[in-house]
Image (cartoon, coloured by chain):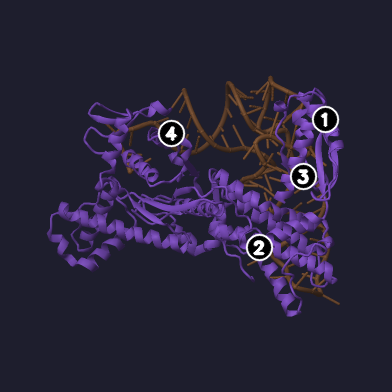
Chain colours: A purple, B brown
Amino acid sequence: MEDIRDMLKQEISKVLEDLARDRGVAPELLPEVYLERPKRPDQGDWATNVALQGAKVFGSHPREVAQALAERLTPGEKSCVAGVEIAGPGFINFRLSRGWMGAVAERVFSEGERYGRSDLGRGRRVQVEFVSANPTGPLHVGHGRGAVVGDVMTSILEFTGWQVAREYYINDAGLQVDNLGRSVQSRYFELLGQGERAPFPEDGYHGDYIRDVAQGVLDQEGPHLLDLPLEETLPFFREYGCRTLLEVIRKDLEFFGVRFDVWFSEKSLYDNASVPGMIDHLRGRGFVYDQDGAVWFRATAFGDEKDRVLIRSNGAPTYFASDVAYHKDKFDRGFDLAIDVWGADHHGYIPRVRAAVEALGRDPQDFQVILIQMVNLLRHGEPVTMSKRSGQFVTLRDVLDDVGPDATRYFFLMRRSDSHLDFDLGVAKTQGADNPVYYVQYAHARMASIFREAEARGIPVPSGVDPLLTEAFGSPEEQALMRQIALFPDEVAKASREYEPHRLVFFAYDLACAFHSFYNASRILGEEPALRDARLVAVRASQIALANALRLLGIGAPERM
RNA sequence: GCGCCUGUAGCUCAACUGGAUAGAGCAACGGACUUCUAAUCCGUAGGUCGCGGGUUCGACUCCUGCCAGGCGCGCCA
């Protein structure tokens, strides 16, 4: 299909240049040729709007230009073009001969699991940092959305020729882990009936899981920590709590099918002096100065609205300081592109980090952020309230146990990540018609079932595409199905370029839809051999495309349901 | 006050980045299983694309001014 498009494009460009020469139009004024797939089948298989774009430079009407171009375009055997017509305000529509469907199927067959791959990334290295939730409690639903978006994004990037590293940034330095340590410490004392000796911190973590962590300390250490000064044991509680909760997070993510190559410790940036190193580096480039006893980054030099503090006047570094050091580290490690997946409430933070990236001497485009909007959790239309403070929030684990990983992934991915998402646990759980996950998976199960039945009847499934056999193609449903299959590489590329993993969910859904229509309209195994084999080829191609899409999404492709 | 995001069918969302008659799913109504899975399909109905200007062959898409909602504007993380 790609090949056909390229050939068409070249031919149109050539004809356009010929026409320009004949009419004395300078070639550099000519518009670029775009070929697009019309929405409606009666508008052909491919269409171009060059005549509309170029009417002005020709000093003529779009339809007249289109007519002139069309006259010079002769349907050719090789390009599969069966017809050229002018429509609407001046579109040129191309109708392909039936052979195109065979060409699509042939490509899908020969590429198999690789169908949809590309070399967009050209082997460049990209690091995707996602989730990065503070290790102060279990993951909640919002983290889950970021986890899936990041995970699927990495799969897509890998599939499109990038060398990918998946990374989790652990915020194990600073105030919040301190609070965690004190919270655990307090609960530990409480378990031993001496809670009043270690008061619960004002901004402490109230969730029950803190008691579990404290119980773990008690089981491991016994009561001897009671006898030591609070400040002396705090580092232990802090470290223990952090490690334990991180392990909980890691297990939840693993259950969700999300894995990381690197777990990067914020604390390590201080242990190995990366933060002062970064500050020296930026100071040397003239982007750091001292004022009011604090150390500042000149973010305004790169379009941020104000300069930002790196080291407070009390000597403590800001979160931003470690973040800049972390991003410097990313680029020092040789990544060509760094993609961060953040909660949308952090969007105001983007300009300063981008400014820092630029100050480090990188193209600001080498740093990209995917924003994840809020998830509204509902149960049968009723909002489920979440408050991490009080500890009464619905965890990712709760949702996974309730509706399962496949449905959870699907729901998190079915909207653009930067738009609000209503996640109704009731709907996600129903196995009925209003649950799109099953609609898609059912399509795959149906395909598998056809092949099972074929085997039972002793009907061999064609392993290749016989050009004669594809002449049997042709119903509107078959065409729609093959058209959708042919779209897959484009959709993957688009998802990769635009950082929009949800596109694949829409693709999978549309493919399932095209398949269900085809299935209901066509008999397969009962038909005479030529037609039967052609349809088996279509089903196999559908199955490969759908399985590839589901694999990228991390959603199961069941053989039966 | 400033910045970012959002506003499309009763509800939840698409619209190939400026293209042709704005499309799906729920919800409503009417049909299709003696067949390779009816967790499916087909049809009907539903719209001043928040509102007003502008740009051009052409605007849901771009520019501008309003209106409404969300988020953000710390020497917090």
Tell me: A356 left or right of A419: left
Q: Is residue A80 visible?
A: yes
Tell me: A93 left or right of A488: right
Q: Which residue is mark 2?
A: A544
Marks 3 and 1 share the same chain: yes
Tell me: A505 left or right of A87: left
Q: CA distance from mark 4 to mark 3?
A: 41 Å
Say which mark, if any, is on residue A46. Answer: 3
Q: Earlier in the sequence, mark 4 or mark 3?
A: 3
Marks 2 and 4 share the same chain: yes
Residue at image point 39% right, 58% down: A249
Q: Quadrant of residue A275?
A: top left
Nearer the viewer's eye, disc 4 or disc 3? 3
Q: Quadrant of residue A324?
A: top left
Marks 2 and 3 share the same chain: yes
Question: Under tag 3, what secondary structure?
Answer: strand
Q: Which residue is mark 4?
A: A351
Q: Quadrant of residue A46?
A: top right
**Which chain is home to disc 1?**
A
Residue at image point 72% right, 69% down: A463
Contact (CB < 8 A) between labels 3 and 1? no
Amino acid at the residue labelled 1: Val
Relative to A91, is A251 above or below?
A: below
Amino acid at the residue labelled 3: Trp
Q: CA distance from mark 1 to mark 4?
A: 46 Å
x, y (%) of residue A536?
A: 75, 67
Question: Under tag 2, what secondary structure?
Answer: helix
Q: Which residue is mark 1?
A: A65
